[in-house]
Amino acid sequence: MPETMPHPLCPPAPLRLRLDRYHRRTGCATSIRNRIGVDLAGGFYPAPHRYRLYLSAECPDSLRVAITLDLLGLRDSLPTTVLAPDGPEASTALRGYYEATRHRFDGPLTVPALCDHWSGHIVSNHTPDILRDLADHLGPESGGLLPRLRPAALASQIDDLREYLAREMSVSEHHDATSLDRRRKALALLDRRLASGPYIIGTELTAADIDLWVTLVDPRLTDAVRDHERLVAYVRRLHRVPAFRANHTVPVPQGAAAVGRIG
């Protein structure tokens, strides 16, 4: 049977996010790209409870951020608000951050958004930068039981894989033959790469695995993913990790030999 688990990013149906209310993707006209740093003179420096994240339901970028928060044990020190159409107080608060950051702001509310309580400004709504800062500056300083999601030796490979997935695995409403062929080739390459170990880069779980897993569990890719045994095993193995399982409600893919229909 497919595995499903409720999670805090997916409220009950009446509260689910309507995509016409918030923009989920970054890179638009309202892009804000400040960074968390360690220099006290830089303005945005690490401090517990200083920042708040705004996410949205059914948003792949928000799912990436939520998994990262749990893996790094940041839920208590970095509160999170999930925007929903019937939550005007939450959306009003986020709009206040945008208006304080951009004079006469009248654009869409873009999430994920990392906001600063102290200044009332948005630090960033650029997901890759948010994920880097969570791992590099707001996450665990060293060792322990928590993973190092962006070890310095693998940082460039992690970024390269993220760009590769965005370029080769993007799914749009229009499924032309070229894009379908590109995704098939990318899935085959990723499947072969997993033959060398349980993780896509290195010998331990990293941010690259979060990026790949969120890509593979997209319901629009279910049929294509389930034809690759290593990818299916990889998705199901990471789904057993609490941070992945607790933040995902869509059934994970099973191998074509195991089931005739997914969902």
Image (spheres, rainbow, N blue to C red):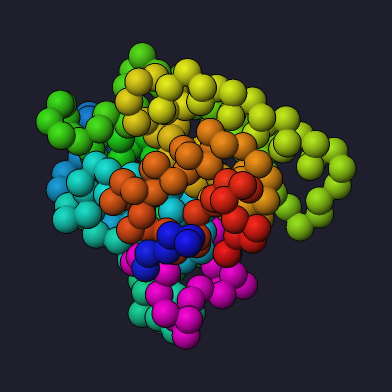
> How many tags in the picture?
0
Q: Residue 69 location in percent, x, y?
A: 29, 48
Report the side of 177 relative to 168 (left or right).
right
Q: Nearer the viewer, residue 28 or 99?
A: 28
Q: Nearer the viewer, residue 76 or 165?
A: 165
Report the side of 81 relative to 176 (left or right).
left
Res. 116 in view? no
Which residue is farthest left? 144
Work out which quarter of the rendered image holds the C terminus and state it.
Answer: bottom right
Which residue is farthest right? 177
Q: Residue 195 location in percent, x, y?
A: 51, 22
On screen, residue 236 above or below 12 = above
Q: Residue at x 76, y 57 (%)?
A: 173
On screen, residue 203 above or below 97 = above
On screen, residue 3 above or below 164 = below
Q: Residue 114 location in percent, x, y?
A: 36, 52
Image quadrant assignment for residue 198: top left
Q: Residue at x 27, y 43 (%)?
A: 71
Res. 4 in view? yes
On screen, residue 47 above or below 77 = above
Q: Residue at x 73, y 36 (%)?
A: 184
Report the side of 192 relative to 74 (left or right).
right
Q: Residue 121 location in percent, x, y?
A: 35, 55
Residue 67 is covered by the magenta coloring:
no
Majority secondary structure of magenta residues: loop
Image quadrant assignment for residue 237: top left
Q: Residue at x 47, y 62 (%)?
A: 1
Q: Nearer the viewer, residue 219 or 191?
A: 191
Magenta residue span: 7-26
Which residue is farthest front? 257
Which residue is farthest top? 153
